[in-house]
Image (cartoon, rainbow, N blue to C red):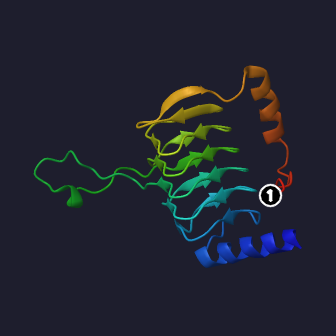
Amino acid sequence: MRKFLRQVRRYFWRMRLGLKHVDPTFLAGGKSSINKDLVAGPFSYIAPGCMISSGVEIGAYTMIGPRVMILGNDHVHNVAGKPVIFSGRPEFKKTLIGSDVWIGAGCIIICGVKIGDGAIIGAGAVVTKDIAPYSIMGGVPAKFIRQRFDLEQQALHGQMLALPPSDGGYPDKR
């Protein structure tokens, strides 16, 4: 019965948000502003209160915490004699977020960055540059804290991520 209710909830949010490019196992946890072109892999999750702009792709098993903002393209700001509002926008850049990434509550991710598989971004961080796989980052701007795994564990985890996605089961609530 729980599995059925989870499927119904996922379907409801996909339809309500008009998301056509997300896996059937994708879940939006509540009211968020998500662009309809979002591409989301299996078992990925977006918590309530997020703002996800266009050109965002997230991989399998990725979790995005509440109130995360993935901002759209910037504005051209260096044209003398012209207000920023009339200066246009630079070339569009996609934001790519790998598989098994965990983005903490309140993070801001600037358009065009690439976040590698297995990375963890601490709550409140501002990501302005690409993040290497399996890195733990935090702060404003986000800085490297440590690696999530040693090299042997990274290889093992990478092998798991290369397999077809499967439902590992959610842990029982305590």
Q: Residue at x 62, y 78 (%)?
A: 16
Task: Report the front residue among 106 and 90.
Answer: 106
Mark 1 lies on a secondary structure that is: loop
Residue furthest to the top in view is 151
Identify the image quadrant of the N terminus. Answer: bottom right
Quarter of the image for residue 101 reads top right
Residue 131 appears in the rendering: no
Mark 1 is surrounded, within 10 Å at the Cα level, by few (under 14), some (14 to 19) or many (20 or more) other residues, namely few
Front residue of 160/79: it is 160
Please identify the residue farthest to the right as the structure is shown: 1
Q: Is residue 141 above or below residue 61?
A: above
Whether 78 is drawn above or below 7: the answer is above
Q: Is residue 33 visible?
A: yes
Residue annotated with mark 1: 173
Q: Which image quadrant: the C terminus? A: bottom right
Q: Residue at x 52, y 64 (%)?
A: 49
* Three-letter code for the amino acid on which mark 1 is drawn: Lys
Left/right placement of residue 99 relative to residue 36 reads right
- The answer to whether 142 is drawn above or below residue 98 in the figure is above
